[in-house]
Amino acid sequence: MVGIIHPCKIYGAMAVARPILYLGPKPSHVSDLLGQHEIGWHVAHGDVDGALGAIAAARAMPKPDLAAMGARARLALRDGISQAMLCGRMCDAMDRVFRRDATEASGAVVMHRTEPGVSCVR
């Protein structure tokens, strides 16, 4: 179901600044994040040697390098894919599609850019 769903646990790991070891298909949203931000390792399904190699690489990596990888993960989450940011982008896209701004006075549903804690539809 690549392209439709992906493991949401990656966001928790990124939020607590941890490197990621992803065992799954490529291309996928998770493998894209790993490649774009250099925040972990990707291993294809069934690649036992690759998994062992990734685990060995993680274990051998100096702690400051692991910490830097985790810090990049947290920064990528905060600056590029936070819930508030993604909801805002979705609302902006929907607004472009439906062009509801002109009908606000008539009481129609209006899509608007969100801020943290603000609903997408009013």
Image (spheres, rainbow, N blue to C red):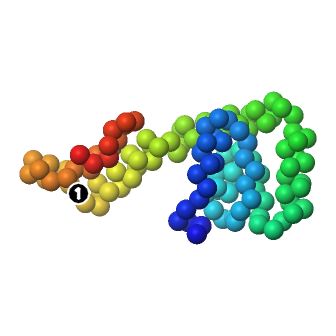
Mark 1 secondary-structure assignment = loop
Q: Nearer the viewer, residue 13 or 42?
A: 13
Q: Viewed as shown, does residue 122 lie left or right of 29?
A: left
Across and down, in percent, residue 48 comes to 87, 63
**Is 17 drawn above or below residue 86 in the view shown?**
above
- Regarding residue 72, the answer to whether it shows in the image is no
Q: Viewed as shown, does residue 83 lie left or right of 19?
A: left
Q: Farthest residue toward the top?
A: 64
The image shows a total of numbered marks equal to 1
Q: Nearer the viewer, residue 89 or 15?
A: 15
Across and down, in percent, residue 5 comes to 55, 62
- Regarding residue 105, the answer to whether it shows in the image is yes
Across and down, in percent, residue 22 comes to 73, 55
Q: Nearer the viewer, residue 105 or 16?
A: 16
Q: Viewed as shown, does residue 88 lie left or right of 96?
A: right
**Quarter location, residue 23:** bottom right
**What residue do we see at 55% from left, 66% from top?**
3
Residue assigned mark 1: 99
Disc 1 crowd rating (10 Å Cα; few below 14, some 14-19, many 20+) is few
**What residue do we see at 25% from left, 60% from top?**
98
**Is 51 drawn above or below residue 71 in the view shown?**
below
Screen quadrant of the N terminus: bottom right
Across and down, in percent, residue 84 comes to 43, 41
**Quarter location, residue 15:** top right
**What residue do we see at 90% from left, 48% from top?**
56
Q: Nearer the viewer, residue 76 or 12?
A: 12
At label 1, which amino acid type do we have?
Arg
